[in-house]
């Protein structure tokens, strides 16, 4: 069972009971592995480039953030290669790194005390495309591609569970870009029920022709062919985003259990909240600000406690203006540093928010705010203090991470140094 820790002098009950992150695993377009990615982020090094995985000549959008140098055979046991697709292999690699970083050996844990809760959104496109191709080539002898797509997400999480012997509760959250935060919140709930360890976060990939067609149909992709001008959140020149792949998986632990085994800790998940936007055309206001306010309340904190915001950064004028207005309304105009390192990776669907969460935790560790590259000064109608081009030193103790998912999802997580 979860053991409640004593409240340290000056700490709130919320902070004392907050679960902690003890391991991070990353697969990202500008770095494979946590420290390689983080070093690239601090250098302002982008992983956005022309798509190499398939021919984009027939498409209006030609840029993406692809994970470089990923040799699946070097990371995945041979027996699993025929059973997995590209997204699952990325996720398995991130999970292995996170568990090793945390120093967690699942074989040494009590049965059913460790689980997996991840987010997914678009990664099933590549799997579904292969099933369609098989269906066409085999005269209908295969399971329907649509059925395959539906259970793909459970298979992806199941592979992490089976490979690592994580026999506790598992699950998948599907709320698009917000999913990486929502999965961490669900992991927190399981820890409060008595679980000791959860591998959580999100890794996603849909860089295949079928997935690309779906992204284009959404009408939100930039068609610029210049990697330095294609994804410009909060800029007056913003005209869409770039798709990327990858994300981050985290090891979330009960704080008392982590302390008892002497684990290194990146930070605590101090607060979380989610809201849902009103239906389009209803006249209702977006509710991202409400998610941030509720997350701070859940953490027992106020806006004055926040040292940096990791923004959702949609890269579309209306959405960026709405987010900037929410931040200015909560903190005051230009009152808190805001960053969006996803300008170096593109938007990673379910992997994006958990990668921002990893950046927030590493920023707290190193006392530095990573930059938002290429975007330049914010537009006049985006009154925020955007950290651009060059990283900015702390001091940092509290970070707020925001995410919005297609369809109206809003999520916010507060992380604290410990």
Image (tube, rainbow, N blue to C red):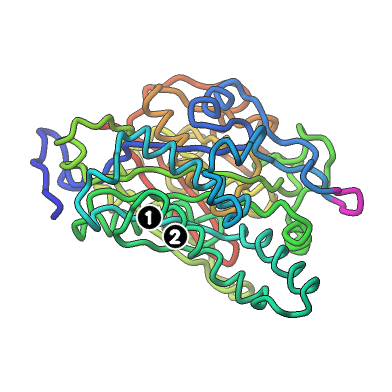
Q: Earlier in the sequence, mark 1 or mark 2?
A: 1
Residue 372 shown left or right of residue 299 in the figure = right
User: Where does the magenta region start and end?
Assistant: 55-60
Among the 4 quarters of the image, the one containing residue 122: bottom right
Residue 151 shown left or right of residue 5 in the figure = right
Residue at x 81%, y 48% (from the top left corner):
54
Residue where numbered disc 2 is placed? 158
- Residue extending furthest toward the right: 58
Quarter of the image for the N terminus: give it. Answer: bottom left
Does residue 270 appear in the picture of this structure? yes
Task: Residue 265 in the image: state x and y as whole percent.
Answer: 29, 32
Residue at x 11%, y 35% (from the top left corner):
8
Q: Bin the neighbour count of mark 2 within 10 Å (Cα to Cα): few under 14, some 14-19, many 20 and up.
A: many
Q: Main secondary structure of the magenta part?
A: loop
Does residue 328 appear in the picture of this structure? no
> Is 368 in front, or is 82?
82
- Residue extending furthest toward the bottom: 140
> Is 47 in front, or is 260?
260
Mark 1, mark 2: which one is toward the viewer? 2
Q: Magenta includes 18?
A: no
Residue at x 76%, y 32% (from the top left corner):
228
Residue where numbered disc 1 is placed? 116
Among the 4 quarters of the image, the one containing residue 176: bottom right
> Is 6 in front, or is 91?
91
Task: Residue 272 in the image: state x and y as whole percent.
Answer: 35, 53
Q: Secondary structure at mark 1?
A: strand
Among the 4 quarters of the image, the one containing residue 128: bottom right
Give the vertical position of 121 relative to 75 (above or below): below
Task: Residue 173 in the image: state x and y as whole percent.
Answer: 46, 62
Q: Magenta includes 58?
A: yes
């Amino acid at each position: 069972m979860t053991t409640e820790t004593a409240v340290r002098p000056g700490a709130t009950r919320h902070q004392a009971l907050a679960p902690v992150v003890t391991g991070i695993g990353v697969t990202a377009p500008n770095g494979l592995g946590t420290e390689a990615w983080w070093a690239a982020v601090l250098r302002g090094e982008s992983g956005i480039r022309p798509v190499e995985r398939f021919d984009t000549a027939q498409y209006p959008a030609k840029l993406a953030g692809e994970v470089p140098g990923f040799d699946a055979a070097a990371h995945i046991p041979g027996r699993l290669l025929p059973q997995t697709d590209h997204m699952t292999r990325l996720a398995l690699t991130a999970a292995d790194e996170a568990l090793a970083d945390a120093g967690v050996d699942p074989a040494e844990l009590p049965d059913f005390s460790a689980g997996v809760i991840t987010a997914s959104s678009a990664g099933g496109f590549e799997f579904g495309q292969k099933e369609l191709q098989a269906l066409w080539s085999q005269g209908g002898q295969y399971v329907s591609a649509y059925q395959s797509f539906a259970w793909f997400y459970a298979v992806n999480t199941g592979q992490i569970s089976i490979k690592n012997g994580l026999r506790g509760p598992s699950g998948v959250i599907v709320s698009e870009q917000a999913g990486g935060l929502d999965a961490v919140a669900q992991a927190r709930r399981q820890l409060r029920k008595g679980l000791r360890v959860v591998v959580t976060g999100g890794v996603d990939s849909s860089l295949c022709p079928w997935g690309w067609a779906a992204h284009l149909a959404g009408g939100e992709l930039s068609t610029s062919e210049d990697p330095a001008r294609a994804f410009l959140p909060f800029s007056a020149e913003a005209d869409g985003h770039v798709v990327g792949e990858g994300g981050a998986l985290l090891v979330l632990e009960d704080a008392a259990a982590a302390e008892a085994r002497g684990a290194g800790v990146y930070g605590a998940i101090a607060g979380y909240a989610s809201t849902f936007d009103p239906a389009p055309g209803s006249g209702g206001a977006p509710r991202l600000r409400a998610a941030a306010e509720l997350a701070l309340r859940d953490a027992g904190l106020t806006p004055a406690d926040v040292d940096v915001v990791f923004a959702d950064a949609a890269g579309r004028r209306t959405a960026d203006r709405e987010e900037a207005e929410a931040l200015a309304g909560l903190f005051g105009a230009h009152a808190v540093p805001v960053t969006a390192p996803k300008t170096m990776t593109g938007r990673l669907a379910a992997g994006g928010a958990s990668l921002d969460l990893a950046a927030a935790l590493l920023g707290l560790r190193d006392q530095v705010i990573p930059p938002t590259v290429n975007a330049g000064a914010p537009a006049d109608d985006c009154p925020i203090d955007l950290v651009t081009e060059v990283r900015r030193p702390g001091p940092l103790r509290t970070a707020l991470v925001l995410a919005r998912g297609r369809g109206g999802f809003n999520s916010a997580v507060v992380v604290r140094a410990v």
